[in-house]
Amino acid sequence: MILFAERTEPRTSPLRPPADLVEDAEGYTLRLELPGVDPASVEVTLQEGTLTVRGQKPAPALGAAAWHRRETLSGPFERSVAFRGELGEVEATCAHGVLTVRIAKAPRAVAHRIPVRTPGA
């Protein structure tokens, strides 16, 4: 069962970092490819069930050099994912150009066994 859906928003920048979203029994893991982005400049927020990642990828500085071809993108970016249901703790790490955001499910949202009781026992 899918419990999340990416929010549609107007694209103000051509930069849209690739993202993977995985669910397991304990929560969700969002990974975004952010090569060349300073982790200190990335903003991760969770508000009313929507996780948003914002940042800016700077253009390479070439000094007095002239561009002959440019295929890399730069500029601001934003990715948002709306979750249904309760969420727990959120933590974000960035290593080797990949931002990983781990969102725990609320304790009561995690599947667990319910004991069956009998009257008088």
Image (cartoon, rainbow, N blue to C red):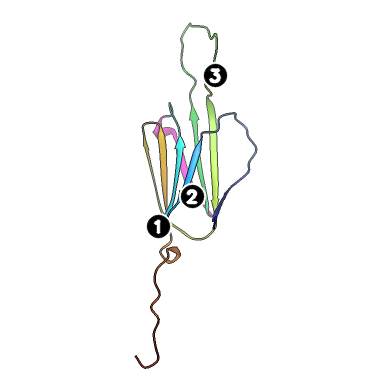
Task: Tell me the magenta residue range.
Answer: 38-48
Callout 3: SS:
loop
Identify whether 18 is placed above or below 61.
below
Nearer-N-terminus badge (2/3):
2
Q: Are marks 1 and 3 in contact (CB under 8 Å)?
A: no
Residue under label 3: 71
Q: Are marks 2 and 3 in contact (CB under 8 Å)?
A: no
Amino acid of disc 3: Glu
Q: Is residue 118 left or right of residue 46?
A: left
Relative depth, front residue between 92 and 112: 112
Residue under label 2: 46
Q: Position of residue 74 (x, y in %)?
A: 52, 24
Q: Residue at x 56, y 29 (%)?
A: 15
Residue under label 1: 26
Identify whether 49 is placed above or below 66.
below
Toward the bottom, the furthest residue is 120
Amino acid of disc 1: Glu
Amino acid of disc 2: Leu
* Distance from Cα at disc 1 to Cα at disc 3: 39 Å
The crowding category of the residue bearing disc 3, from other C-alpha atoms within 10 Å (few below 14, some 14 to 19, many at least 20), is few
Q: Residue at x 42, y 65 (%)?
A: 111
Callout 2: SS:
strand
Q: Residue at x 45, y 34 (%)?
A: 33
* Distance from Cα at disc 2 to Cα at disc 3: 32 Å
Q: Nearer the viewer, mark 2 or mark 3?
A: 3
Q: Residue at x 52, y 60 (%)?
A: 85
Q: Position of residue 79 (x, y in %)?
A: 54, 40
Q: Is residue 94 left or right of residue 7?
A: left
Q: Nearer the viewer, mark 2 or mark 1?
A: 1
